[in-house]
Amino acid sequence: MAGRPRVRAERLDEQSIVGAALEIAQQRAADLTMRSVSDKLQVSVGALYKHVPGREALVALVVEKILGQAPPMSPDGGDGWLALRAQVLGLQALVDRYPGLDEVIVAHSPNSPTANELRRAGIAALTSQGLHSDEAYKVYRAVTYLWLGSRVAVRGRARNATDIDTFAFALDILLAGLKREVAESAQPQPIYVKT
């Protein structure tokens, strides 16, 4: 019968909506719409709107769910530099599971509570190594720029083994250089006096 609402066996909630949205996004990010999610869940679009106000909110929930799967990082878990490296490589692998969502994740990260928590943890790991907070922030930003550039470079396609190895190599070089720069800037500078 036309116009009759579909009946869903399970209760519709935010968790099931985000789960369906992730399944759709893994196949093709452009197909992530309120209509596609409602079709997957076998509910009306109106039922979906009772839980999620629109596509932007849906995408934000998806980004939070993806970033929430990032490997945890503890500032007192040992070497902060290695912890930062592990965090970045873990994020790369995580985003690789959702090809095509790179741009969406990058666009929503500045306002994402989960992304902000990842940033705080990364900076805290560096400050636990003796870096001043401004140095830790600059290091974290430099690593973020490398990560962002690598995601732009692949343009939503799945990374291949060469991409993965090249990124890890570039990350190691960047971290080694930053670590050296921070160590050298912490050394007292000799004062030369003209006689």
Image (tube, helix red, strand yellow):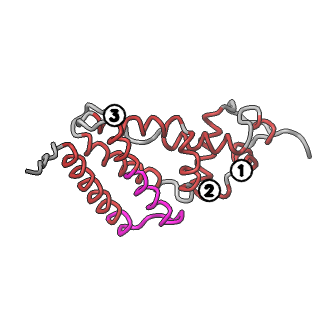
Give the image location of residue 47, x and y in percent. Answer: 78, 35
- Report which residue position mark 1 lands on: 33
Q: Badge 1: how crowded within 10 Å, few (<14), some, or many (20+)? A: some
Q: Which kind of residue does numbered mark 3 sit on?
A: Ala
Label for residue 163?
none
Q: Badge 3: how crowded within 10 Å, few (<14), some, or many (20+)? A: many
Q: Which mark's residue is nearer the viewer, 3 or 2?
A: 3
Give the image location of residue 106, x and y in percent. Answer: 54, 51
Q: Secondary structure at mark 3?
A: helix
Magenta-drawn stretch, dominant element (helix, strand or loop): helix
**Residue drawn at (70%, 46%) of the image:** 37
Relative side of 188 to 111, left or right: left
Q: Earlier in the sequence, mark 3 or mark 1?
A: 1
- Report which residue position mark 2 lands on: 29
Q: Secondary structure at mark 1?
A: loop
- Report which residue position mark 3 lands on: 124
Q: Residue furthest left?
A: 195
Q: Residue 3 appears in which quarter of the rendering?
A: top right
**Residue 54, above or below 104:** above
How far apart are the alpha carbons under marks 3 and 2? 33 Å
Circle 2/circle 1 CB separation < 8 Å:
no
Give the image location of residue 147, x and y in percent. Answer: 42, 55
Q: Secondary structure at mark 2?
A: helix
Q: Is residue 6 visible?
A: yes
Q: Nearer the viewer, residue 151 or 143?
A: 143
Q: Which kind of residue does numbered mark 1 sit on?
A: Thr
Q: Which mark's residue is nearer the viewer, 3 or 1?
A: 3
